[in-house]
Image: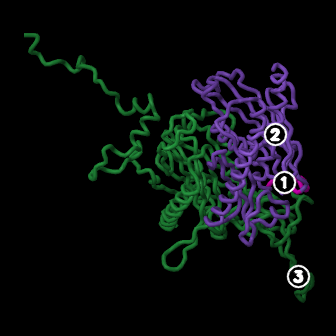
Amino acid sequence: MAASKPPSPAISPPSLSFPRATFAKLSPHPFLLAHLQPPTPPSANTTPPHRPNGRLPTQFRPPNLHTGSLTHASGSSVVRLGDTAVVCGIRAEILPASNVGCAYTCGGSDDDTEIQALGLLVPNVELSTGCSPAHLPGQPPSPLAQTLAARLQSLLYATNLIGADELRIMYVSPPADDAGEGGGAEEVKAWWTLYIDILFISLDGNPFDAAWASLLLALKDTRLPLAYWDPDLACVLCDDLVANAKRLRMRRWPVASTFAVYSAQERGSVGGDGAGKWILADPDAFEEGLCRESVTVVVDCEEAEGGGVKTRIVRLEKRGGGSAGKAEIKEVVEMATERWRVWRDVLKGNA
Amino acid sequence: MTLPDASLSHIHRADGSATYLQNGYSIIGGVNGPIEVGRRDELPEEATIDVIVRPAVGVGGTRERHLESIIHSTLQHVILIQNHPRTLIQVTLQVIRMPDSDTFNSKKRQFSSPLRILPSLLQTALLALLSASIPLSTTFTASLITVARGSNTVINPSPEDLQNARSTHVLAFSAEGDLLVAESQGEFEIGDWERVFEMGLHAARSGSENRKGADSDVVMLDDDQGGALRGLVQQKIEKDQKWKENIK
């Protein structure tokens, strides 16, 4: 009688295969390789190999944007790329010319050096928010956070996103006599300093692209109140009216794209050529943990006649391995140009 | 183009050391390792690499962390880290002197590109590792290349070249000719970069061809960067192996 009973689910025979997540945890390298390798024998009707996250090797995560969500910031943005979510807030403060002293004398049209010399754009990256298990909250800035801040700052200065005249607070002295003659001399009384704070709410790979995109959007969203020099009080005053506030004018929209290079070659073996390598666009945290080599390209394109675009590379950063050579870099730049198109369309929709 | 100069193993209490001079930069590097690693940084299957960059003036900031991260990921690829699991290899690089163009104005120094110093830092780290006899999978040659306004490329540029450059590039090639590091500053097009790539590769390759000559019992001190350094390392090894000759 007992033998005819169906087995209860609690004592069903243990399965002999691992669930997906366990396999990924136990042996991550073969797991990723099994996903990327084409099926053998090759057959016509199978789908091309996908990454464990379901994307194609050259597929980016679609960006998700929102601007102006922080009410107390001059400008703010939220950018999501999959499970990587970043908030960027911009706080504008006034740097009076009297505080600068003789350290810097305004060179007039010398735009790019003025912002750099005075340090008018100050990015900061905060990773210790509990955004990922690798970054504990309440810790001092990790090397990754410092590296990100340095890369963002140097890219900000190199691209000349904002003209120095946008950040100057000028004073035109009134005519000296009743006839309206004399005076009219322009003088820089103060500058706006923009503190750009980037907080990671959640980090699932590719922090640089997300941080850069959020920085651009927040700058675009920034409104600076109308500031003027009051000669009687001898200080800078700001207008209350929102209608008088002016938006920052962005000169350009360079787009950052990061790629990880995964090589099938087992770690530690030297030489052994012929092993496969894959370029993975927009890597997530799992892939970043397995790929030592990474390439970041920042491109800014100009639309040429006939629908084509002319690609200008603003920055190229490659490190951590020797798999990607000249041909791969060229391929990566082409993919970055495609990505620039995606961002352009998204930004147009957002504007 | 200025030739580099270097001295090896001149600090006696470090496991390996090197001083490297090029283009007005003078950097002293020390390597300690493999040594015991703190439990927090311990890796079960490979050695932990710690890179510390100290500037010539003041204390290190985010710029130095950025340089450290580039050097760290390069060394991680070059050092056979699996040979020394659960240990620490510490590389300390102290900048001793900067060229006048960088120190002239402290404000200017702050935003002069950090890339200029990167090739010298990478070479110093490599020489110090060689001096410490840390097993490496390959060696590398790092060079600084600029693209001027007329699109002509200059390797190991002078301060005037740097001033007039449209873009500045740092490339490091392994002995096999693989591209290990590529960093850039300034704007350029893919055609420019391909020329820069060829130039860097040629500089790295010409070094490895000279090495073949050096194997045939002729010490060739070539007037290229790789050759000069190779001669120095060879002299050091000959000095280290002297005791063997007397045994015979």
Q: Residue furthest left?
A: A1
Q: Residue at x 92, y 60 (%)?
A: A102
Q: Nearer the viewer, residue B184 or A203?
A: B184
Quadrant assignment for the N terminus of chain A: top left
| Type of secondary structure dominating the magenta stretch | helix
Position in image of residue B244 (x %, y %): 80, 22
* Label disc, if present, on residue A175 of the rendered structure: 3
Q: Residue furthest top?
A: A1
Amino acid type of the residue tagged 3 in the rendering: Pro
The span shown in magenta is B101-111
Q: Nearer the viewer, residue B1 or A253?
A: B1
Is A120 on the left-hand or right-hand side of B100? left
Whether marks 1 and 2 lie on the same chain: yes
User: For the residue labelled by badge 2, is the local secondary structure a helix, a strand or a loop?
Assistant: strand
Amino acid type of the residue tagged 2 in the rendering: Arg
Q: Residue at x 58, y 51 (%)?
A: A295
What crowding class fits label 1: few (fewer than 14 Cα within 10 Å), some (14-19), or many (20 or more)?
some
User: Mark 2 = which residue?
Assistant: B54
Q: Nearer the viewer, residue A13 or A141?
A: A13
